Image (tube, grey):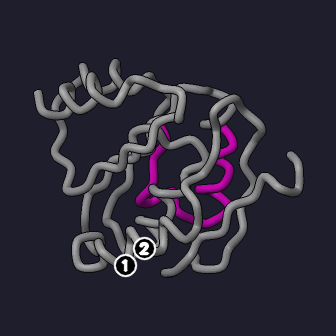
Amino acid sequence: MAARNRLRIVAGEWGGRRLPFPDARDLRPTAERVRETLFNWLRAEVAGARCLDLFAGSGALGLEAASRGAREVVCVERSRRVADVLRENVERLGGGGCVSVTVADARRYLQGPALPFDLVFLDPPFSSSIIDPVCAGLEA
């Protein structure tokens, strides 16, 4: 993995930790400043929450939520190779007790059993037109 393919957990238990992510088409972690702002807004909602990171990729959003006290984080990533690196990062952080990684397409995942989540993170690839059907699947 190239040296530039690293993300930094902004705050919480794992704050400051740097993690690798693979080169993959359309994979780009949510920017650090965006995550910092987002999680500052969600501060009161994250602690103890059950979270779904539906287009997990590098795991930036899900791992940030876990670092900031989410009770459970389910990361869904369609690429097995990217999901394997995400699993390695979860192990590296010692987050296996609260973070799980599932290899699945977002729409197929949502067709499975309806599970309750307190927070859902949706950050699909830029080139994707999947957001509308995924939101409809979440609503259903």
Which quadrant does the N terminus fall into?
Answer: top right
The quarter holding residue 62 reads bottom left
* Residue at 44%, 44% in the rendered image: 123
Which quadrant does the C terminus fall into?
Answer: top left
The quarter holding residue 136 reads top left
As drawn, the label of residue 40 is 1
Q: Nearer the viewer, residue 7 or 97?
A: 7
Q: What residue span does the magenta drawing correspond to?
A: 84-101
Label 2, on which residue? Answer: 37
Q: Secondary structure beneath disc 1?
A: helix
Q: Could you tell whether 85 is left or right of 129 in the image?
A: right
From the top left corner, tell me how far across and down residue 120 is, in percent. 29, 49
Specify whether residue 87 is painted magenta.
yes
Q: Could you tell whether 17 is left or right of 73 in the image?
A: right
Question: Amino acid under label 2?
Answer: Thr
* Residue at 23%, 32% in the rendered image: 135
Question: Amino acid under label 1?
Answer: Asn
